[in-house]
Amino acid sequence: MNRSVDSRSDLYALGVTFYEMLTGQLPFTAADPMEWVHCHIARQPAPPNERVAGVPGPLSAIVMKLLAKTAEERYQTAAGVEADLRRCLAAWEVIRRYRLVPAWRARWVGSVADPGEALRPGARD
């Protein structure tokens, strides 16, 4: 508790903001200021993808890392958050492209359990 405040505190606040954007709720509920402090120091929120169906697991993991209790477990810089968000976006775009494949290409791809499998070089020649 006797720690200096640095930019990683801002990343925690970003995690709270993302959490509310994804779930429509704050990560914790409390009745008074001391309970709020206790929640932020000691309680672990439910991951966003457990509260709301459809939140991608990787995005939920990013939010949970932003909400880590100790600063050392959080992202160390905003650049790290950005890099992971960009990776999530790239993966989502690949999956989205696969789902929007025309019917004739869907027959070529066949029934692939993992959309990324069909996109790997040499997977289906």
Image: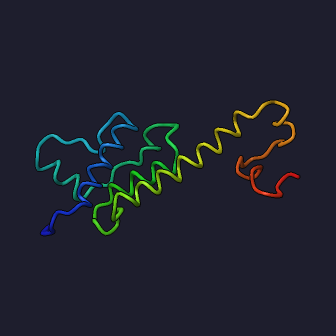
Could you say where residue 81 lies in the image, as x and y percent from the top left? 40, 56
Counting every numbered tag in the picture gives 0
Which residue is rendered at x = 43% and y = 40% of the image?
51
User: Which quadrant holds the N terminus?
Assistant: bottom left
Could you say where residue 123 lies in the image, as x and y percent from the top left? 82, 55
Quadrant for residue 79, please give it: bottom left
- Figure coloring: rainbow
Which residue is rendered at x = 52% and y = 37% of the image?
54
Could you say where residue 44 lies in the image, as x and y percent from the top left? 32, 54
In the image, 41 versus 88, the foreground residue is: 88
Q: Is residue 112 above or below residue 99?
A: below
Which residue is rendered at x = 52% and y = 49% of the image?
57
Could you say where residue 92 lies in the image, as x and y percent from the top left? 58, 44
Quadrant for residue 77, please give it: bottom left
Farthest residue, direction top: 103
Would you say 79 lies left or right of 94 here?
left
Which residue is rendered at x = 31% and y = 44% of the image?
27
Q: Is residue 58 above or below residue 32?
A: below
Would you say 96 lies left or right of 20 here?
right
In the image, 96 versus 46, the foreground residue is: 96
Farthest residue, direction front: 79
